[in-house]
């Protein structure tokens, strides 16, 4: 049953218009951010360009995570609104139906983050004359997108209502960044800042003081706790509520 359900989910992934829309948004967002760089940066020393690229990468990763979470939420709420969930529950158990959505949220979130990275690198190549790619940062950004996609799916299953889920998921991922300006010591324990630190991405560019930053192992543990809470809440909501 699980194999059949995974094949059905994979077929829907091929024509995923939600993924296409959010990916395009991530690409345009990163292009707009990077294109704001002064054009004379191309003549700056390589060290200066690499420092700017590092800060910009963290910002792009953060916005990519926001959009990845939106994708994870939208993928569920759109299917629920269109009756796809109810149709599949006629053929699958609730456990199976929910479980097979996890790979799609993970892969979709990573694809959205990848689009943001590609757009940012293209813009940096044009404005800054090209900067070497740090593959460790690429891997961290994709992992962040995958985790954010799962976070969005968990919240989307809990909220269910399409537009309300968009607001709540976006707020959960962007609100702590604003909170960091007022209370950095508390904001670093919230997504997406704690997720960025868990994946070793620099959050200095997001206005977080060095004294407020978390140790990598602590950030990973807190991130795992948030993910377990979101997925557990989503699982309980899916198993107990009427999703038709």
Image: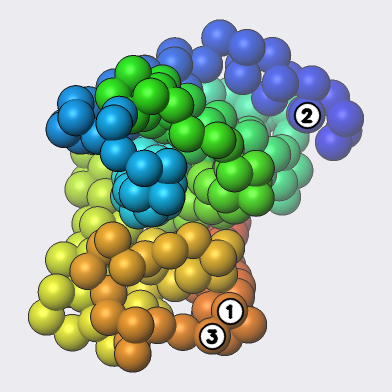
Q: Are marks 3 and 1 in contact (CB under 8 Å)?
A: yes
- Viewer-proximal residue among 104 and 148: 148
38 left or right of 61 in image: left
Q: Is residue 56 visible?
A: yes
User: Which residue was labeled with disc 3?
Assistant: 215
User: Which residue was labeled with disc 1?
Assistant: 216
> Picture quarter containing residue 105?
top right
Q: CA distance from mark 1 to mark 2?
A: 34 Å
Q: Residues within 10 Å of mark 2 (few under 14, many from 20)?
A: some
47 left or right of 127 in image: right
Give the mark nearer the N terminus: 2 vs 3: 2
User: Which residue was labeled with disc 2?
Assistant: 6
Name the element at disc 3: loop
Query: Where residue 67 sits: x, y (%)?
Result: 36, 39
Q: Residue furthest top?
A: 15
In the rendered view of the protein, which quadrant contains the C terminus?
A: top left
- Viewer-proximal residue among 61 and 235: 61
In the rendered view of the protein, which quadrant contains the N terminus?
A: top right
Q: Is residue 150 above or below residue 192?
A: above
Say which residue appears at 11% left-offset and 80% top-offset. Answer: 182
Q: Is residue 225 visible?
A: no
């Amino acid at each position: 049953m699980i194999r059949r359900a995974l094949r059905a989910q994979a077929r829907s992934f091929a024509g995923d218009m939600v993924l296409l829309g959010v990916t395009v948004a991530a690409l345009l967002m990163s292009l707009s951010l990077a294109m704001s760089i002064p054009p004379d940066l191309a003549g700056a020393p390589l060290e200066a360009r690499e420092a700017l690229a590092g800060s910009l990468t963290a910002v792009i990763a953060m916005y990519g995570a926001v959009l990845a979470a939106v994708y994870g939420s939208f993928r569920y709420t759109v299917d629920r609104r269109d009756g796809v969930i109810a149709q599949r529950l006629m053929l699958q158990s609730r456990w199976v139906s929910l479980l097979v959505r996890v790979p799609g949220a993970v892969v979709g979130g990573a694809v959205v983050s990848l689009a943001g990275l590609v757009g940012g690198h293209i813009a940096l190549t044009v404005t800054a004359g090209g900067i070497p790619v740090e593959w460790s940062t690429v891997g961290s950004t994709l992992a962040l997108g995958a985790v954010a996609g799962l976070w969005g799916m968990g919240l989307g299953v809990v909220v269910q209502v399409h537009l309300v889920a968009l607001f709540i998921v976006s707020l959960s991922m962007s609100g702590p960044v604003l909170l960091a300006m007022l209370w950095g010591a508390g904001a670093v324990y919230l997504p997406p800042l704690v997720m960025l630190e868990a994946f070793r991405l620099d959050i200095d560019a997001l206005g977080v003081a060095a004294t407020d930053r978390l140790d990598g192992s602590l950030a990973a543990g807190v991130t795992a706790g948030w993910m377990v809470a979101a997925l557990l809440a989503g699982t309980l909501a899916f198993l107990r509520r009427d999703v038709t």
